[in-house]
Amino acid sequence: MADAREEEGGVRPQKTKRTWAERVALIIPLVNLLVAIHKIAEEWILPYV
């Protein structure tokens, strides 16, 4: 399969190396989303349970 790609002239994509700062920057929006979901559940759902 890899040989077929090379014959067609396709270039194998390079694996991108990320620094720890870049990884944290990618995780921050996910953490914010989880915090928001927790706050919504705490204020709107838990009082009725």
Image (spheres, grey):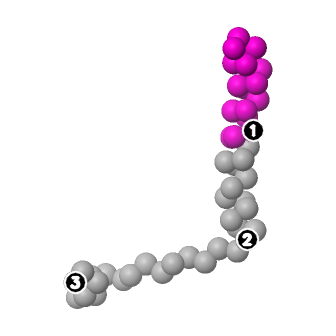
Residue 45 belongs to magenta span = yes
Question: Where is residue 7 shown, x and y percent of the image?
Answer: 23, 88
Quote the CA–CA distance across marks 1 and 2: 22 Å
Q: Are marks 3 and 1 in contact (CB under 8 Å)?
A: no
Considering depth in this image, is 11 or 15 the residue closer to the camera?
15
Which amino acid does the dot numbered 1 rest on?
Val
Q: Residue at x 69, y 18 (%)?
A: 45
Look at mark 1 in the image and give the residue it sits on: 35
* Kind of residue at badge 3: Ala
Residue at 72 percent across and 47 percent down: it is 31
What range is drawn magenta here?
33-49
Dot 1: element: helix
From this viewpoint, is residue 9 visible? Answer: no
Which residue has dot 3 on it?
4
Q: State which quarter of the image contains the N terminus.
A: bottom left
Q: Is residue 31 above or below residue 37?
A: below
Circle 3: is it few (<14), some (14-19), or many (20+) Cα within 10 Å?
few
Q: Position of residue 26 (x, y in %)?
A: 67, 58
What amino acid type should be assigned to the residue bearing mark 2?
A: Trp
The residue that label 2 is drawn on is 20
* Earlier-in-chain disc, 3 versus 2: 3
